[in-house]
Image (cartoon, coloured by chain):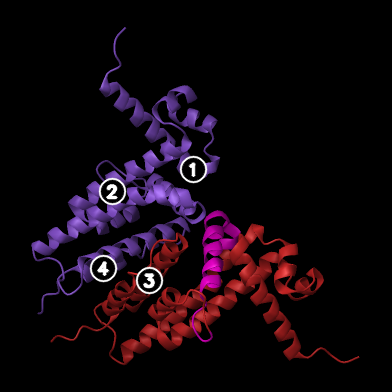
Chain colours: A purple, B red
């Protein structure tokens, strides 16, 4: 009997994550029933829960996956770019921050953080990743002299995260977002070094 | 038979708004049943719905009342002060922006905006009030030379509203807020005129 290759396992895992992401985004955590997850992934419940212990583990893996992809974009291009991607292309694209589906996961995370203390502690470890990527990026910017140096890097990190939180909430409420590009310019400029002219 | 005085009507209306605010904040819109609203206000359903057509109208009056109180604080002290009040005294106090209860109403508004298109259009007219107060305040600051003049007042208004949205979301998720004071300093400073020194 041939051993299942690691590549195959990875591909299957990816298939489940991608399918269930859209499902959670569309139906919310509670509404993403096992039947709907089967439809969305094209796999049986047996196959799905062979890879993930339960629905909660699947959802956390998804949120973790999103956080990793965002951390990559942050490391390369900064948190403001993540926000710009959200604004300009809510469907998401290759190499960009995750778009609408990510927004769905993120909102579901927000909702569960408000209502579920155990989830809050499980999530805390995972969300730290994005904060760390943001802080690292800002430190690099600082070393290369692009960052303002009169405000602590931790304050700048919290500032950018707060604006991202506002943007997520804004988009989630379906409020008009076509006037937000200059707002993000302002956000970006306010963490940069001001060269006296 | 003596006529019911206008003062009395106003006081009764205030009693209903104050009682039901805590009730909506605690139980959410759906969970704030008529029985709970009776308990929270100390009045019968007959008395409550004499003053407000139905639960939706009561909730909108409440949201409108909060928006008015916030607009007053904004006019006097600016939107950043509203945020500082939220941070420093989530219980709210006389003359300050509404605190925790306001947060509850606001979250409920956010949730319904996401899920209820009709509510979205009824709300749009009311939320405009806070935006207008913020814009007016910024224009006055601009005239007195305290505001940066390289960015449009509308952009600064959207910026401050986006940060407020992020703060509401942050607090609602129960995330630590004790490090946010310097973040609000940064926000305030980033709309001010930079005097070259």
Q: Nearer the viewer, mark 3 or mark 1?
A: 1
Residue at which label 3 appears: B158
- Gap in Å between the C-alphas at discs 3 and 2? 25 Å
- Gap in Å between the C-alphas at discs 2 and 4? 20 Å
> In this rendering, do the residues under marks 3 and 1 share a single chain?
no
Secondary element at image label 3: helix
Magenta part of the chain:
B94-120
Q: Nearer the viewer, mark 1 or mark 2?
A: 2
Check the image and report above or below for A185 versus B47.
above
Label 4 near label 2: C-beta < 8 Å? no
Mark 1, residues whose alpha carbon is within 10 Å: few (<14), some, or many (≥20)? some
Which circle marks residue A70 in the picture?
2
- Gap in Å between the C-alphas at discs 4 and 3? 21 Å
Is residue A108 visible in the rendered image? The answer is no
What kind of secondary structure does the magenta stretch mostly adopt?
helix
**Chain under callout 4:** A
Q: Position of residue A3 (x, y in %)?
A: 29, 13
Q: Position of residue A46 (x, y in %)?
A: 47, 22
Q: Nearer the viewer, residue A94 or B36?
A: B36
Mark 2 or mark 4: name the one nearer the start of the chain.
Answer: 2
Mark 2, residues whose alpha carbon is within 10 Å: few (<14), some, or many (≥20)? many
């Amino acid at each position: 009997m041939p051993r299942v290759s690691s590549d195959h396992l990875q591909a299957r895992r990816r298939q489940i994550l991608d399918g269930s992401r859209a499902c959670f985004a569309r139906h919310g955590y509670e509404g993403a029933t096992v039947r709907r997850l089967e439809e969305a992934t094209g796999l049986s419940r047996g196959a799905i829960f062979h890879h993930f212990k339960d629905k909660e583990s699947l959802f956390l893996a998804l949120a973790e996956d999103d956080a990793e992809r965002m951390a990559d974009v942050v490391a390369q291009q900064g948190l403001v770019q993540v926000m710009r991607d959200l604004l300009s292309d809510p469907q998401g694209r290759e190499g960009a921050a995750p778009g609408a589906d990510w927004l769905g996961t993120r909102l579901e995370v927000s909702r569960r953080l408000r209502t579920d203390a155990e989830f809050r502690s499980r999530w805390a470890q995972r969300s730290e990743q994005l904060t760390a990527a943001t802080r690292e990026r800002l430190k690099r910017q600082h070393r290369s002299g692009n960052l303002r140096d009169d405000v602590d890097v931790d304050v700048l990190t919290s500032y950018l995260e707060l604006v991202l939180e506002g943007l997520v909430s804004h988009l989630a409420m379906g409020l008009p977002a076509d006037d937000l590009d200059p707002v993000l310019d302002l956000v970006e400029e306010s963490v940069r070094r001001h060269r006296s002219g």
